[in-house]
Amino acid sequence: MTLAAEIDYPETPREEAVDTYKGPDGEAIEVRDPYRWLEADVRESDRVAEWVKQQQAVTDAYLDSLPEHEAFVRRLTELWNYERRGAPRRVGKPGVAARRYTYSQNDGLQDQAVVYLTDAPGVDGRVLLDPNQWSDDGTVALAGYSPNYQGTLIAYQRSEAGSDWRTIRVMVIDSGEQLEEELKWVKFGGVRWTPDGMGFYYSRYPEPEEGAAYQAAALNRKLCYHKLGQPQAKDKVVYENAEHPDYSSGLWLTEDGRWAVVVESQGTDNQNRLLVRRADRPLGDDPAGGWTVLVDDFENEFSPFATVGDRLYLLTDHLAPRRRVVAFDLAKAGEGAFRDSLVEIIPESEATLESASFVGGVLFAERLEDVAAAVGRYTPEGEPLGPVELPGVGSVSGFGGWQDAMETFYRYTSYDTPPTIYQYDIASGESTELFQPNVGVDLSQFTVRREFYESKDGTRVPIFLTHRKDLELDGENPTILYGYGGFTISLTPGYSSSRVAWLERGGVYAVANLRGGGEYGEPWHEAGKLQNKQNVFDDFIAAAEWLVDQKITSPEHLAIQGGSNGGLLVGAAITQRPELFGAAVPAVGVMDMLRFHTFTAGQFWRDEYGSADDPQMVRYLMGYSPYHNVRPGVAYPATLVTTADTDDRVVPMHSFKFAAALQHAQQNSEATPENGARDDGAANPLLIRIESRAGHGAGTPTSKLIERTADVWAFLWEHVGPGGGGE
């Protein structure tokens, strides 16, 4: 019999499609793509929609049959049902607007968090924005909001079905009246009000051609100014780069409204060009005119975050791979070399500088010390004022606000500590706890430890382990290894109610801080991108081997999980070392490394991955691209590929084609213990879970999160839990 005899997978026709790429020596490289037809948008193709329907029916039947599925649904519903809040945000500028604050809150099982308005931090307020009223199924989400300086109006962004596309609306805060504003084709950006409250800056893309909105590459971004009361068609373009339509730009406005700064990048890397102009003076008709170029290359990161008069504060990796804070006199813009004019304010240290802010005359610098947060305080001249005392080894976010405010807020969390909100008094340097959720679980039963292991080339890599204190680590513990490893994203400690459902059953949860992330600055990132990408996979594989060597688990009881770039990681891991894992869940992964850049935001990822347009990268990308490395006769672990039919960040064709390739390989392999048959003669399931009306992850309703997590946990427990792993 074939390996697929137990599961009747839907038929996925293989068709003749061949691409020819130019290799490093000018040679022609032909690559077959039999599932090219699965790239069609499910909204536009009945054929793909039918395939999705059939695949999901098979997956649903399998998941519903799992003995622990309903138990996970019940427990996750209980664990998610607790009140949680976000940090307060001041509404309007101090001295201009009345003292009021917004905060987000979810009562527990609400599909979307609600934004409240209050007169004082920590005091219950009234509903300001409730996304739960925007749709019957909870799939229309709030994607961001910004009050004006006067605290009278709020511009907010709505996203539907998880799409990256957003619509900007404007509401009167006191009355709830909706203004006529409805700005469309907005993506990857926020709103910057002008001090007079009469309008704001935002970014947009051209309206896509019919049927191409959710797949076309993101090109020709424009920075615009919208004056209240005018139709979007009359919005003034303040900056665009017609020579480089693939560049991405954002506008940062100084708090006093005197200066506008354009931060322009080639993709997702932090390195950027920098342009400035006076924002309080008329702009000519030429969107490229009136700007002074400070940085005209992509060698360094220069991220503006505050001004004092004409002194601009920036976060940079210039002469500081782990970043430092510098200042520049904007009054001297265009006079001499920019880099030579920088004044160092906060020097680089051994710890990676993650972010910086300026509130109440104090500079706050958040660093990572072996993946644990530390926050320092400084004068505007860079004199140390001492640290902000944090509760433990965890993550922190916040310390934002108006520059003349005398308070700021932050959130602290760790693997065993739910997100707790603090108010920080600038004058006294004291933190006051405003809110700690009651999660209904005794978290003292769990232990968290940070360890280090060696990767293939000897690199020291951190890994966090969480499990019950009373758990005997006997080498057969059901373990999930999670990773990401890319785009300078640091995986810092954070609480997850869904993980509790795994941990309390006796599972272990491990998070590896792989190269490609930002944990140790730009060198750590560079070591895991482009032609160093294999280091990321080696780090992940080494983490799995370490977990086995340490008698924490075994390959039969080890599952791997990751999303987006982490989905690519999992796909690469199971195609390179399939025997090392008992189960895998690659979520919304980038699986076709030869064509990713031709869809939506994929063109921004070329500075991370390279692209098949570059002859020097073609063979390297082919060498690890999960879709192109699936082979018949290989024992792949039980795999649940997950995606969403309306994901327009990593379009679902990646997961569709990868799942089809896995199923085809299994259907064309003879069932033997050596190539994937379990002891009972059955094959490992290779399934795809396709969420409807959902995107890449942001804005997903709570109800869908519970359903998805229950499916994943039940699948993994079946295959790596007690009695799983082919036992």
Image (cartoon, helix red, strand yellow):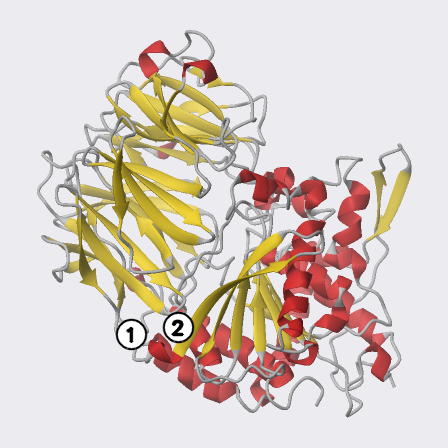
Element marked by disc 1: loop
Residue 348, above or below 565: above
Outermost residue, top side: 335
Quarter assignment of residue 189: top left
Residue shown at 11% from the left, 38% from the top: 97
Quarter assignment of residue 512: bottom right
Residue 437, above or below 345: below
- According to the picture, the residue beneath numbered tag 2 turns out to be 497
Residue 65, above or below 601: below
Residue 505, above or below 459: below
Say which mark, if any, is on residue 82: 1
Residue shown at 70% from the left, 62% from the top: 573
- The image quadrant where one finds the N terminus is bottom right
Spot occupied by residue 67 in the image (x, y as percentages of width and height): 56, 91
Residue 436 or residue 247, whichever sits in front: 436
Q: Is residue 283 left or right of residue 350?
A: left
Q: Is residue 145 left or right of residue 224?
A: left
